[in-house]
Image (cartoon, helix red, strand yellow):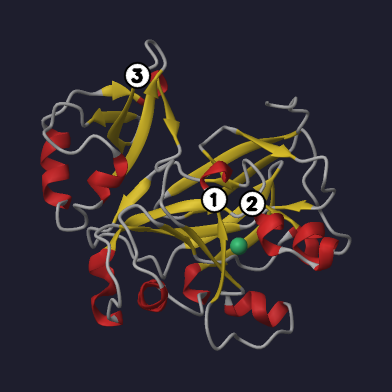
Amino acid sequence: MQLARYQRRDNGSIGLCLVEGDVVRPLGGSGLPQDMRSLLSTLPEGASSLRRAAENSSRLPLAEVKLLAPIADPQKILCIGLNYADHAAESKMALPQYPVVFTKFQNAIIGPNDTIRLPPQSSEVDYEVELVIVIGRGGKNIPKEQAMQYVAGFTVGNDVSARDWQLKKGGGQWTIGKAFDTFAPLGPTIRVNDGTFNPHSAKVWTEVNGRRLQDSNTNQLVFRTEDLVAFLSGVMELSPGDIIFTGTPPGVGMARKPPIFLKGGDTVTVCCEGIGQLTNVCMNDRSPAKL
Ligand code: ZN
């Protein structure tokens, strides 16, 4: 099941739906919660109610809606660095003993086909395809053995990164490098954790202007979903709708010779097999002051 947020193209109304091929099944009027965080808090246990609600729902052609970021207002956006064995080998770095964690904020989230704004403060903006964990029921000190019961599903993210800020400027600032507006494209859907999807055996790839630059598999993850949920929930209580970017495989632009950085007009597509493809176009940011 592919859960999403949509906006109707005819009247602009926003709602939750399941996506089935080229059809959406709106969940309005189903009796289920109509905001994503509340709905996620019922998953994965409530997956069967979700399926039933969708079966009783109307059908809308996918072409009549715009899919939005599946969750726009997570309480926390947690991100993991250096979490692919093949990426660590490529970087000649030892596997980390503990997950390397950094954060983004809600301002960074955009949805499918939204624009990645390349900030004037950076000339080294890079792409990173990532499997993203979506937390269902929240919890603290969740045991690894039970961790999957706290996962509502999985989506795809692009951990857009200004490398010059992340690694050089001001002494190297991960928060600044990762937190610019629009630096967390997310979607198109949340693959519900109903036992039909193995998050640790899925191809992940990135294409920029149709050229494949990252191409790996989540079977290379060092810290898997259960490890991350157990580790992070030991540090902070996880809440429904929190999202965890799980790290990126090899092939990022900065590691290429010569490096490849995103430019205005570039089209970036990131994909996780079994979830979907997320495409965004880049534009040089010329936003006026907002006062
Ligand atoms: Zn990343």
* Residue with the mark numbered 3: 13
Q: What amino acid is found at the position of numbered circle 2 in the picture? A: Ala
Disc 2 residue crowd, few under 14, some 14–19, many 20+, Cα 10 Å: many
Pick the front one: 69 or 24 = 69
Spatial CA span between label 2 and label 1: 6 Å
- The residue depicted at 67 percent of the width and 68 percent of the height is 250
Is the CB–ligand 1 distance for label 2 below 8 Å?
Answer: no
Answer with mark 2 or mark 1, whichever residue precedes in sequence.
1
* Residue with the mark numbered 2: 179
Q: Is residue 244 visible?
A: yes
* Residue with the mark numbered 1: 105
Q: Quadrant of residue 29?
A: top left
Q: What amino acid is found at the position of numbered circle 3 in the picture? A: Ser
Q: Is residue 90 left or right of residue 55?
A: right
Is residue 255 positioned above or below 260 on the image? below
Q: Position of residue 176 (x, y in %)?
A: 70, 55
Name the element at disc 1.
loop
Q: Quadrant of the C terminus?
A: top right
Pick the front one: 205 or 237 = 237
Q: Position of residue 90 (x, y in %)?
A: 72, 78
- The residue depicted at 75 percent of the width and 40 percent of the height is 118
Q: Is residue 161 left or right of residue 73?
A: right
Is residue 74 positioned above or below 95 on the image? above
Q: What amino acid is found at the position of numbered circle 1 in the picture? A: Phe
Quadrant field for ligand 1: bottom right
Q: Position of residue 39 (x, y in %)?
A: 23, 45
Which label lies toward us, 3 or 1?
1
- The residue depicted at 41 percent of the width and 70 percent of the height is 200
